Image (cartoon, helix red, strand yellow):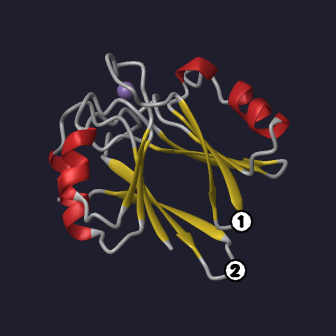
Amino acid sequence: MKILIVSDTHRKNENLKKVLDREPPFDMMIHLGDAEGSEVIYRKWLPVQTRLIVLKGNNDFFTELESEKEVRIGRSLCLLTHGHYYNVSLDTELLRKEAKARGFDVAMFGHTHRPFQETIDGVTLLNPGSLSYPRQEGRRPTYMIMDVDNKGRAEYTLHELED
Ligand SMILES: [Mn+2]
């Protein structure tokens, strides 16, 4: 199973469109917030059988999207959240503790526009960065691919969008 993980597109969708043209086939797309209404377009871009999960970000108003979601992917119980309620711009401690306390294997977040991956004490935190407004050094647009093997084990790879 292959899962595309993106975040913080803020209604600037050209780069995501490029990824959607290049990366298929994948089984699921997770957007970790601040799509700002574009989730309607993504649903149209994706094949009907591709599952789409979009979280509510701090810039998503007037929406019925959820702020948090629990989803089991292979062996991993994943907490999906934009992350601003956990002060992820400051550091990831609060989110890590919350994920640990609630028994999650993985917590995926966005908000910082900076790619991040770290496993501590059995909990993997990851952030795919932003495809539209990257803020890390070099400011390359990024996304992640989660590959789940037939035993349910997950591997994550960070990708920079190439022109
Ligand atoms: Mn954002």
The crowd level at tag 1 (other Cα within 10 Å; few <14, some 14-19, many 20+) is few
As helix, strand or loop, the secondary structure at mark 1 comes to: loop
As helix, strand or loop, the secondary structure at mark 2 comes to: loop
Return the x and y of residue 110 as percentages of the image width and height: 48, 35
Return the x and y of residue 31 as percentages of the image width and height: 40, 44
Q: Is residue 152 above or below residue 41?
A: below
Answer left or right for 162 relative to 61: left
Residue labelled with disc 1: 75
Q: Is residue 162 visible?
A: no
Query: Where ligand 1 lies, by image quadrant?
Result: top left
Q: Are marks 2 and 1 in contact (CB under 8 Å)?
A: yes
Q: CA distance from mark 2 to mark 1?
A: 8 Å
| Mark number displayed over residue 132 | none
Q: Is residue 29 above or below residue 55?
A: below
| Mark number displayed over residue 151 | 2
Q: Amino acid at mark 2?
A: Lys
Depth order, front residue of 46/112 = 46
Answer left or right for 123 relative to 116: right
Q: Residue at x 76, y 30 (%)?
A: 98
Name the image quarter holding residue 95. top right
